[in-house]
Amino acid sequence: MTDAKDVSSLSFEQALAELEAIVQELESGQAPLEQSIEMYERGARLKAHCEARLEAARLKVEKIVVGPQGAAERSEAADFA
């Protein structure tokens, strides 16, 4: 695992892969208690990082509104709800 300070430098895919590995390790119950706590804390930071990356991506996505003639008239923020 990498240091806590590098979480912000990870891509979404890297952070998610590491988070999945941590979840598997914690679910196995094989890690000692102190290591499990450290892994859980790292997992929480990775989860927050992934959520922030997803939110940033969501804000970048725009919906293109097409007019009656088939031409793009404007763009609007995407509505994911």
Image (tube, rainbow, N blue to C red):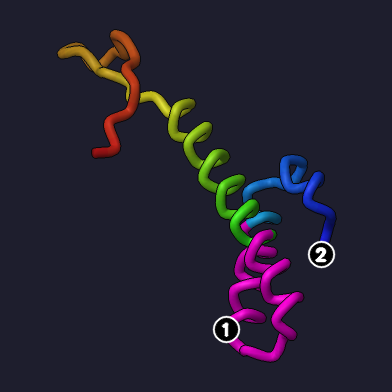
**Image point (34%, 15%), residue name:** 75
The answer to whether residue 22 is magenta is: yes
The answer to whether residue 10 is magenta is: no
Residue 17 sits in which quadrant? Answer: bottom right
Horizontally, residue 70 falls left or right of residue 19, namely left
Q: Which residue is mark 1?
A: 27
Secondary structure beneath label 1: helix
Q: Which amino acid, by three-letter code, is at mark 2? A: Met
Find the residue positioned furthest to the left.
68
**Image point (27%, 31%), residue name:** 79
Horizontally, residue 43 falls left or right of residue 2, namely left
Q: Which amino acid, by three-letter code, is at mark 1? A: Glu
State the extent of the magenta-drawn residues as a range.
Answer: 16-41
Residue 53 sits in which quadrant? Answer: top right
Q: Position of residue 25 (x, y in %)?
A: 66, 81
Between 33 and 31, the one nearer to me in the picture: 33
**Image point (29%, 37%), residue name:** 80
Circle 2/circle 1 CB separation < 8 Å: no
Q: Position of residue 74 (x, y in %)?
A: 32, 10
Q: Which residue is mark 2?
A: 1
Secondary structure beneath label 2: loop
Residue 44 sits in which quadrant? Answer: bottom right
